[in-house]
Image (cartoon, grey):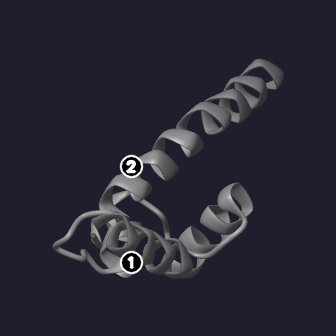
Amino acid sequence: QKAWDLSAGSSCRIIRPLKIQKAIILLEQPSKVSINDIAKELGYSTPSYFHTKFKEYYGITPSAYRKNWITSSQDNTEP
C-alpha cells in the first residue's frame, strides 16, 4: 500500500504540470474554447477544481490568464 501511495503522488506531480501546460495552449487559441470545456477536456472533475489548480500553479485564474494573453498579444501586433 505504501508503494502505491508514493507512486500515485509522484504521478500527480508529473501529470498536473502537463495538464496545466495543455490548458495554456488551449487558453491561447483564437477559437476561445470555453474554460469549462478546457477543464472537461483535461479531465478535471469540476471547472472550479480546474480554476483552483490553475491558480495554484500560475497565481492567476484561467480567465485572467486568457485576458492578459489577449491584451499582450494585441500590444505586440500594434505598429
Q: Looking at this rendering, what residue extends furthest in the front direction? A: 79
> Viewer-proximal residue, 25 or 69?
69
28 left or right of 53 in image: left
Crowd class of label 2 (few under 14; some 14 to 19; many from 20; radius 10 Å): some
With respect to residue 45, does 5 lie above or below? above
- Badge 1 amino acid: Ile
Residue 11: horizontal and vertical position, in percent?
61, 30
Residue 56 quadrant: bottom right
Q: Looking at this rendering, what residue extends furthest in the top direction? A: 3
Q: Check the picture and name the quadrant holding the C terminus.
A: bottom left
Residue 1 quadrant: top right
Numbered tag placed on residue 35 in the rendering = 1
With respect to residue 46, does 21 lie above or below? above
| Tag 1 secondary structure | helix
Residue 33 quadrant: bottom left
Per the model, the C-alpha gap separating discs 2 and 1 is: 12 Å
62 left or right of 54 in image: left
Residue 37: horizontal and vertical position, in percent?
30, 75
Numbered tag placed on residue 22 in the rendering = 2
Query: What residue do we see at 27% from left, 67% from top?
Result: 77
11 left or right of 46 in image: right
Who comes first in sequence, dot 2 or dot 1?
2
With respect to residue 10, does 76 lie above or below? below
| Tag 2 secondary structure | helix
Query: What residue do we see at 39% from left, 49% from top?
Result: 22
1 left or right of 76 in image: right
Query: What residue do we see at 77% from left, 25% from top?
Result: 6
Residue 65: horizontal and vertical position, in percent?
52, 71
Query: What residue do we see at 68% from left, 55% from top?
Result: 57
